[in-house]
Structure formats: structure tokens, C-alpha cells
Image (tube, grey):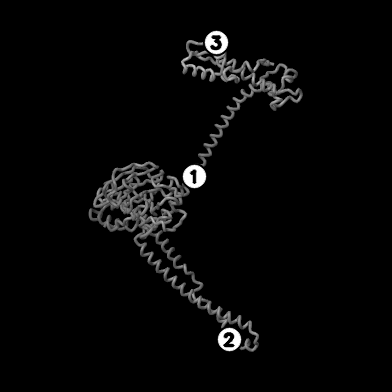
Amino acid sequence: MAEARIPVRMNRLCCSICSQVLGNPVTVPCGHNFCMRCIQDRWDREERSRSPCSCPECGDRFPRRPLLIENTTLADLVRDTPALKRARTGSKTGSPLCGRHSISLDVYCCTDEKVICQECASSEHTGHTFGFVSRERRRNQEELKNIQMKSQQILQKHEKKQKNLKKALERIQEEARNTEDHCEAVLAGVIDAIQRHFLSLKKVIGAQGEATAARVQTSLQTLEVRMNEMRERSAELERLAQTDDDVHFLERWPSVRRLHEEDHPHPLGGASEDPLRPFELTKRAVDKLGRQLEVFCDTEFATISRTADSGESGGETGRETEEDGMQQRCEASTSQSHGVNITVTEQTVEPKTRADFLQYACGLSLDPTTAHQDLAIRAGDKEVRNDKSSTMFHPERFLHRRQVLCREGLQAERCYYEVEVKGDKAEIALAYRGMDRKSRSSLSAFGGNAYSWSLDRSRNYSVSHRGESVQLTTPPSQHRIGIYLEFKKGALSFYEVSGSMKFLYKVEAKFTEALYPGFWLGEKCCIRICDLRHDRL
């Protein structure tokens, strides 16, 4: 065998201070060995008592605190001796024994990679390389750690790949939502094109509903009368069927039979008509009109833009006439939601006065399907209040925050709108349509994520984005707020509006998709979208 047994008594490998097997043995100048922690603690106490450092074994005193030297040979001897002792007492401690010699399996044959006893090593493994089981375990333990490390690295790569795949899946789902929202925005643009006619259309629909409901109500009343008559005749039939008088039965039967036959050939007038058909026809007509108006607006604005870019003009008067006509067509359509710039002249001049800003006014309406259940939408979808009596529910609403979005997505070169705020706390925001609406975290809060920008109005103003806020020193002094968006330029500015425009803050960012105006309302708060059509005239 390459290694012999080590005939060492365990008491010689014990520390005289703690009486335990030496742990991290060190040698002092007199040659005695102790646990490093034991001798350090001993000398620390002696120094605190201002006594010279001494050897606990022989009592030698040292003029200065000696430098401890680790005894590596003794440390190896200590490890091997307890290991050998455990191997020899394997039968007592429950370690496995050799099936042939009934002694501990304390030898490892490195040649055959097999655990054996000492007798097997002497008789059957001559010339082989041997080692103690405990030492070979430590050596192979290092290899095991390397394998574990490599396995962990591979697992981390797989986890990273899994994370990337999950992100890709999230991007796919997000893109699907964005695509759906984009389609919805296009259809919302058609509604915007006839926004001024919407109130009159609502009256028409209301009249349709009242007329249809009146017809149905009349049919219902007639039906109830006939049902009562039939119940009376059924009761008479029952009484006739129960009579024991044959003569009475035969006398009554002809008249009762005729009355019963008269109930069936006369169904209710108009019963086969669909009472909802007028509404369906109205929706179809509006859909057709919307498509026609959208095509017309796209064609006209494309022609106007090409004409303006080429500089073709019939003189100053002709240009003014053309611009007036264009302005009238612009007022009949909110083409901003399609990215069309409706201003032909002075496109590079920055607006300064309120009249300048009103050139870019856009029509907005609140989207009730996005409103939190505590918010009530009123005044033709132009006003929102914090009204906890509301019972509204829709799967697209904000679930945990009192927020609401507008229907219209803004991505024209320039857009401007104003809102009136009543209450102490409110947020005026613009957000991407796909912003999270279900989370309790900042992902659903205006200004708390990468998908929204918010002007927060309380005792002072602040502007928030990605959860970071810029505190403004300006306290609110007006209830009307102006919002000016330059989509292509990537600029968003906020103003207080009175007779003049008071600048509050300007955000610079790269907008990648249409921005939807939105609002958060504090307690007892009300926000109204201002109608700027009359102010623009």
C-alpha cells in the first residue's frame, strides 16, 4: 500500500486548552501546539490583564506576543487520524463492512476505483494505488464542485434563454394588443370626423328608441289583454269539462268552441318584425358614411399637402381662399389622429399666444370603457367626476386606479387641447394605448412607467415619467390647463391658461406610437375637456 496506518493516540492530537482535537493547529516558540483560536483568546486575556504572553503547556513566558505559525503537517495528521479512527470503528458507528473480512471499508483503490478493506488491499490489489476513503472523498469532492459549477453555468444559460423567450412572448402579446389598439384608433378616427353631429345623431337614435319602444309597449299591452281573455276562456273550458249536466254541456259547447277557435287565427300585428332592426340599419348607415368620409378626408388632405409643398398658388387671394376652404374641411374632421398636419402656413413658427395654439386645437372625448369604476362620465363624454356611486364595469377599464383615457390617439405634427380642473389633486397625462390597466403597481399609474407622461397638480406642479418626478416651484393659480403636443418633434408642453399662456414645463421624448390623453382624479375632483371650436373662430 502507498500509505501506512498512522499509530497516533488521539490524546496527543488534542489542545491542552480546550481538550478537543486540534482545530487549525499552530506552533508557539517553545514548540507546543494549540488551536489557533484557543491560544489567541488566551493571549488576548493576558494582554488585557497586562501579563506577558506565556505557553499554557510549559509556562514559558515571551517578552513580546509571538507570531503564530500554522502547522500544516500536524493539521494533515489530525485529519487523517480521526478518519482512520472512524474507519476502524465502522462497525460500531454503522459504516459498511467488507463482506468477506467483516472489517471496515476504509481503503480506496484508485486503480480499480473501488472501496475495499485493508485485507482485500493486501491480498487482491497488489501494486495498485491506494488512498484513505476520507481523503479520496475530499479529492473527488473538489471535482464534484467543478461539475456542479459547470452544471450551474449551463442552468443559468438556460434560465437566461428562458427569460429571453418569455420576453419575446410578452413582446408578441404586447404587439398583438398594440395592433388591436391601432385598429381601434383608426375606427375611432371615423367617429371623430363626425363629432359635431354626434349629439343630433343621439337625438335621432333616441327618437328611434322611443318609437320602437312605443310600438313594442302597445303590442305588449294588447298581448296582455288577449292573454287575460284566454285565461278566462280556459277557466270556462275547465268548468265546462267538469260539469255533470250533459244538457248544459251540449248547449254551451258550440259557443265555447267558436270562441276558442277565434283565438288562434289572429296573431298580433307586427309580431314577426324585429324591433331592433331600425338600430341595425342606423349602425350600418353610419358605418358606410364613416368609411366614405374617411376616404374623402384622406384624399383631400393628401392633395392639399402636395399642393402646399409644390408652392403652386394663384396669387395671394387664391392662396387665402384655398386656405379658408382647407380650414373648413379641417373643422369637419379630426385628421390629427391619422398623422396629417392640417396647418399649411407658418409651420415653422412656434405658437406664443393662445390664438396661435388654438390653430392646432383637436377634438377629444372620454372613453367610458377605460374608466375606473369610481369615475362617472357625463356631458357627452366631455366630463369625468370622482363618483363612487358609479357601478360601471368594462374589461378594458383601469382596475385599481381612478384613471380614464380618451378615445382619440394623437400623432399629428401638432396638437393642442385644454381641460378645466376642479379639485385639489389631479393628473393630466398622455399614454400609449397598450399601457397596463390591471396592475396594482406603478405599471398602471400615469407617469409611473415608460408608457406615459403626467403633469401632477396638487399644492405644486410636478411632471412624472418612468416613476421619476421633476418638482416645479409653481403653485396652481388657474383651473384651465393647456397641453401642446409636437409628436414628430418629440415635445410635450404644459401651460396654465387665462388671458395669456403661462408656461409650466416642457418634456422632450421620442414618441413611438399614438398618445392618448388621460386623467387621474383625486377626491371630489372633476375634469372637463374644453370645447375650443368657438374660441378658435
- Badge 1: residue crowd in 10 Å (few <14, some 14–19, many ≥20): few
- Badge 2: residue crowd in 10 Å (few <14, some 14–19, many ≥20): few
Task: Report, in whole angstroms, how far the alpha carbon at label 3 lies from the one at label 1.
Answer: 72 Å
Task: Report, in whole angstroms, how far the alpha carbon at label 1 lies from the one at label 2.
Answer: 77 Å
Query: Disc 1 designates what residue?
Result: 170
Give, as a three-letter code, the residue at label 2. Answer: Ser
Circle 3 sits in a helix, a strand or a loop, which is it?
A: loop
The C terminus lies in quadrant? bottom left
The N terminus lies in quadrant? top right
Which residue sits at x=52%, y=15%?
A: 68
Q: Is residue 84 left or right of residue 339?
A: right
Residue 231 to residue 75: above or below: below
Circle 1 sits in a helix, a strand or a loop, which is it?
A: helix
Place of residue 367 in the rendered image (x, y in percent of width and height, measured from the top left): 40, 55
Which residue sits at x=54%, y=37%?
A: 159
Give, as a three-letter code, the residue at label 1. Answer: Glu
Circle 2 sits in a helix, a strand or a loop, which is it?
A: helix
Place of residue 456 in the rendered image (x, y in percent of width and height, measured from the top left): 34, 47
The label on residue 66 is none
- N-terminal of the pair, mark 3 or mark 1, is 3
Mark closer to the observer (2, 3): 3
Q: Nearer the viewer, residue 505 or 523?
A: 523
Query: Disc 2 designates what residue?
Result: 255
Q: Quadrant of residue 97?
A: top right
Q: Which residue ends up furthest to the right in the rendered image?
A: 100
Query: Disc 3 designates what residue?
Result: 30
- N-terminal of the pair, mark 2 or mark 3, is 3
Give, as a three-letter code, the residue at label 3. Answer: Cys
